[in-house]
């Protein structure tokens, strides 16, 4: 007989097999518990094996530390015949449950399968920054080396509380740097994705200065190039936006997905506040900012009713009164806010603020790294005496500086802050 025609015969028996021993195999990223009982008969030929029998998992649990959840009350069964196997699984997580039922077919044409996953209020992620419960109705289908995932995922509850936002973007794990160039690793099982995500009435965000409730629907797909795209709209309702201790009402907050990359949607946000008669002295104002464009290239535009120029609007927004009544400390906050918002022409902002406050020096200085950028405010008291103050716009540390010009290019400069005090003897000359 040829090798593929060699007959196979055997049995696989498991009695109360403890799944905990598999934790080491997964690097403890998945920690299963429970017992397996099974009885399978191996038959057929080497080129066409046949596995029949059944197996069950009872009292199972799986800890998923990276998702912060524990799958409990796991039961699973498989009934294998000559050409197909029936699969059924159940699990709970948090207040909800998940069920998966399907069939696996195998034969001369290869392996194919269908798995229907349904659940209700299932705790999917429970981390300090993200918590989500989902109600899925999703179909998994695969044949050979390809497959697809389709269906609806409702999100009845979610809490998004990110600690911070940075400009750094983490490189995906499937990216390898080769001679400084990014190359995507080939491999993995290519699944075509077509999911409708419905955000319920209890999904909230509290971070990045935003607080409110998210609603809306989003269709997520992968195209032929495996690029993840989104189409739909998410709205921020009952929203608030905080900037430098001031809170603004979000009158309009929309995140728009138009079929492009899901990580770069469009934004249409209006945040505003009313400055009352007492704050504005003679009348009430509405001041705010419109934020538009793509997430990776946001544009900020100030507005007011009645009309004011941008320096006055920002002053009303941040310190609650006219720029003419602002102190040097107020001006630091206003300029820092202008830079934070990325407003175009921030140099003009500084010139406008400086002229109103009768300052001789108002500028930004520092290195190319954002953390080293400081706002410098200064006044020349006499021809030889200069007094200034600079504040780091990111760690909020301030420093007073006093410089006195001696004769023949010599000067003395002292600096004093909450962390240190020092003095320098300087000499300058012109080439």
Image: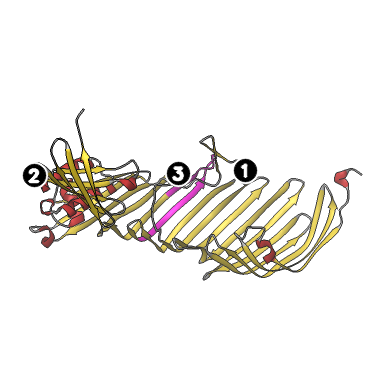
In which image quadrant can residue 115 be found?
Answer: bottom right
Q: Residue at image x 67%, y 47%?
A: 143
Disc number placed over residue 427 in the picture, else none: none
Q: Tell me if 59 is positioned left or right of 376 in this view.
A: right
Q: What residue would you read off at disc 3?
A: 261
CA gap, disc 2 and disc 1: 71 Å
Q: Nearer the viewer, mark 2 or mark 3?
A: 2
Task: Give residue 112's position: percent from left, percent from top.
Answer: 69, 50
Q: Nearer the viewer, mark 3 or mark 1?
A: 1
Q: Residue at image x 76%, y 64%?
A: 54
Q: Does label 3 or label 1 sit earlier along the sequence?
A: 1
Q: Nearer the viewer, mark 2 or mark 1?
A: 2
- Indicate whether 416 appears above or below 406: below
Image quarter (top left, top right, bottom left or bottom right) of the N terminus: top right
In which image quadrant can residue 325 be found?
Answer: bottom left
In which image quadrant can residue 2 be found?
Answer: top right
Q: What residue would you read off at disc 1?
A: 187
Q: Does label 2 or label 1 sit earlier along the sequence?
A: 1
Image quarter (top left, top right, bottom left or bottom right) of the C terminus: top left
Secondary structure under the numbered disc 3 in the rendered image: strand
Q: Residue at image x 65%, y 54%?
A: 114
Q: Is residue 407 magenta?
A: no
Q: What residue would you read off at disc 2?
A: 382
Query: What secondary structure predominates along the stretch shown in magenta?
Result: strand
Task: Give residue 44's position: percent from left, percent from top.
Answer: 84, 53
Query: Which residues are drawn in magenta?
Result: 212-231
Task: Give residue 301's position: percent from left, percent from top.
Answer: 24, 46
CA gap, disc 2 and disc 3: 58 Å
């Amino acid at each position: 007989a040829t090798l593929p025609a060699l007959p196979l015969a055997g049995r696989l028996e498991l009695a109360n097999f403890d799944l905990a021993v598999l934790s080491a195999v997964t690097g403890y990223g998945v920690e299963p518990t429970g017992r397996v009982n099974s009885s399978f008969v191996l038959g057929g030929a080497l080129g066409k094996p046949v596995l029949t029998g059944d197996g069950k998992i009872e009292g199972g649990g799986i800890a998923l530390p990276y998702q912060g959840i524990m799958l409990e009350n796991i039961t699973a069964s498989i009934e294998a015949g000559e050409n197909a196997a029936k699969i059924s699984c159940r699990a709970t997580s948090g207040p909800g449950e998940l069920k998966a039922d399907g069939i696996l077919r195998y034969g001369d044409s290869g392996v194919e399968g269908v798995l229907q996953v349904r659940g209700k209020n299932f705790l999917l992620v429970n981390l300090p920054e993200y918590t989500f419960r989902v109600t899925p109705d999703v179909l998994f289908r695969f044949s050979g080396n390809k497959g697809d995932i389709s269906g609806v995922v409702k999100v009845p509850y979610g809490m998004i509380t990110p600690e911070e936002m940075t400009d750094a973007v983490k490189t995906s794990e499937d990216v390898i740097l080769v001679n400084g160039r990014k190359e995507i690793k080939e491999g993995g099982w290519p699944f075509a994705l077509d999911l409708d995500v419905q955000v319920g009435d209890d999904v909230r965000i509290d971070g990045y200065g935003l607080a409110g409730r998210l609603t809306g629907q989003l269709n997520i797909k992968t195209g032929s190039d495996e690029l993840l795209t989104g189409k739909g709209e998410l709205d921020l309702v009952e929203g608030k936006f905080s900037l430098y201790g001031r809170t603004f009402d979000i009158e309009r907050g929309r995140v728009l997905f138009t079929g492009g990359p899901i990580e770069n949607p469009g934004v249409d946000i209006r945040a505003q506040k009313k400055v009352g008669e007492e704050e504005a002295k003679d009348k009430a104002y509405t001041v705010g900012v419109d934020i538009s464009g793509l997430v990776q290239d946001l544009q900020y535009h100030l507005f007011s009713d009645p009309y004011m120029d941008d320096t006055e609007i920002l002053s009303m927004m941040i310190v609650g009164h006219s720029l003419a009544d602002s102190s040097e400390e107020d001006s630091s906050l206003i300029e820092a806010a202008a830079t934070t918002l990325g407003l175009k022409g921030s140099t003009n902002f500084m010139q406008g603020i400086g002229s109103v406050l009768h300052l001789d020096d108002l500028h930004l200085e520092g290195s190319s790294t954002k953390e080293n950028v400081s706002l410098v405010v200064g006044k020349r008291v006499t021809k030889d005496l200069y007094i200034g103050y600079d504040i780091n716009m990111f760690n909020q540390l301030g420093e007073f500086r006093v410089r006195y010009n001696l004769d023949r290019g010599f000067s003395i400069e002292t600096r004093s802050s909450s962390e240190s005090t020092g003095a320098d003897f300087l000499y300058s000359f012109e080439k």
